[in-house]
Image (cartoon, rainbow, N blue to C red):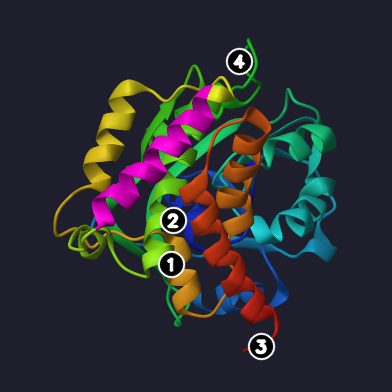
């Protein structure tokens, strides 16, 4: 089984390195500058769960000529359109596409482009960052990957991919309802990003404020109601775990979107918060706090676009 991973940054680089280290046939589709770096320096993951250094196979878009069995999309949402165009030559009649983007807004365009059956569901629970030196730094001890078919039947290559993952250290599972798992994380991430980006602070710091806990739990309730209105009622146990994580006193937890803001970069605000707001409006669900958080990020994006 041949695997193509779009990008060798945080998510794609981490899981790709773990698969490569276990003997999988992995190729990274990267930009020319990243390709030259990886050829010269290799790909290194620094993690409390074990460091990895590999000499990866890399390819650039102009060199892509053949089909792969599994194509993994691990881009940011703001690069989604160009990413789909870049990997299209690699997707053949027997290929499957595994998106590891946050949220769910990417599923409809992927289905339109490749058809629903080849598009898997995927959720990555992983906190990583790409250092200025080009290394992937794992920020905690969680590296969970959820994959699964979105139809009634198991998609081709899914069992083989699961078998490969079983030879790695990655905490993975094959879900019977991967799309629901995506929605569960969507609810959590929209709450986390909405709170930490609006307040520009960690969960612990927000909880120390006079209205912090109410703001967090209000965002979570709105996201729950939107998910339920969209026929994706969050899993009760998973939701309880998320609620505990979002109300943990002293927690240093923040959304990666806040790190994007702190470095002055683009964010996935429209793909996450904007999508949740639009779905709420379409379903008649009040999203007062979500709109406030989304407006805050829209204002940030507007200032960035003006270079101020």
Q: Which residues are magenta?
A: 211-228
* Labels 1 and 2: the sequence-earlier one: 2
Identify the disc placed on residue 193. 2
Which residue matches tag 4? 154
Number of the front mark, 4 or 1:
1
Marks 1/2: CA–CA distance: 7 Å
Residue 106 picture location, percent across and down? 68, 42
Which residue matches tag 3? 307
* Labels 4 and 2: the sequence-earlier one: 4
Marks 4/1: CA–CA distance: 37 Å
Q: Bin the neighbour count of mark 2 within 10 Å (Cα to Cα): few under 14, some 14-19, many 20 and up.
A: many
63 vs 10, left or right, is: right
Tell me, yes or no, whether the two marked residues, 1 and 2, touch with CB atoms within 8 Å.
yes
Number of the front mark, 4 or 3:
3
Q: Which residue lies at the image location 77% right of the left edge and 39% below the top edge?
A: 109
The single residue placed furthest to the top in the displayed view is 152
Residue 255 picture location, percent across and down? 40, 59
């Amino acid at each position: 089984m041949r695997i193509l991973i779009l990008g060798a940054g945080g998510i794609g680089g981490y899981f790709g390195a773990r698969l490569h280290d276990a003997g999988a046939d992995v190729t990274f589709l990267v930009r020319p500058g990243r390709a030259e770096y990886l050829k010269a320096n290799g790909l290194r993951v620094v993690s409390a769960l074990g460091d990895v250094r590999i000499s990866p196979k890399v390819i650039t878009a102009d060199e892509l000529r053949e089909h792969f069995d599994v194509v993994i999309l691990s881009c940011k949402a703001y690069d989604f359109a160009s990413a789909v165009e870049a990997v299209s030559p690699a997707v053949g009649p027997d290929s499957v596409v595994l998106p590891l983007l946050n949220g769910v807004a990417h599923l409809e365009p992927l289905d339109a482009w490749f058809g629903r059956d080849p598009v898997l569901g995927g959720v990555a629970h992983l906190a990583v960052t790409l250092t200025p030196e080009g290394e992937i730094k794992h920020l905690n001890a969680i590296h969970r990957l959820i994959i699964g078919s979105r139809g009634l039947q198991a998609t081709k290559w899914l069992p083989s991919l699961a078998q490969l993952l079983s030879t790695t250290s990655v905490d993975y599972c094959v879900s019977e309802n991967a799309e629901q798992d995506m929605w569960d994380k969507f609810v959590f991430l929209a709450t986390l990003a909405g709170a930490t980006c609006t307040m520009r602070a960690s969960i612990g710091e927000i909880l120390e404020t006079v209205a912090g806990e109410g703001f967090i739990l209000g965002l979570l309730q709105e996201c729950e109601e939107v998910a339920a209105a969209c026929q994706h009622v969050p899993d009760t146990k998973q939701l309880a775990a998320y609620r505990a994580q979002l109300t943990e006193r002293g927690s240093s937890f923040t959304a990666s979107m806040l790190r994007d803001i702190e470095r002055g970069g683009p964010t996935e605000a429209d793909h996450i918060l904007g999508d949740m707001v639009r779905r709420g409006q379409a379903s008649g669900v009040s999203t007062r706090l979500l709109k406030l958080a989304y407006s805050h990020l829209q204002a940030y994006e507007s200032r960035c676009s003006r270079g101020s």
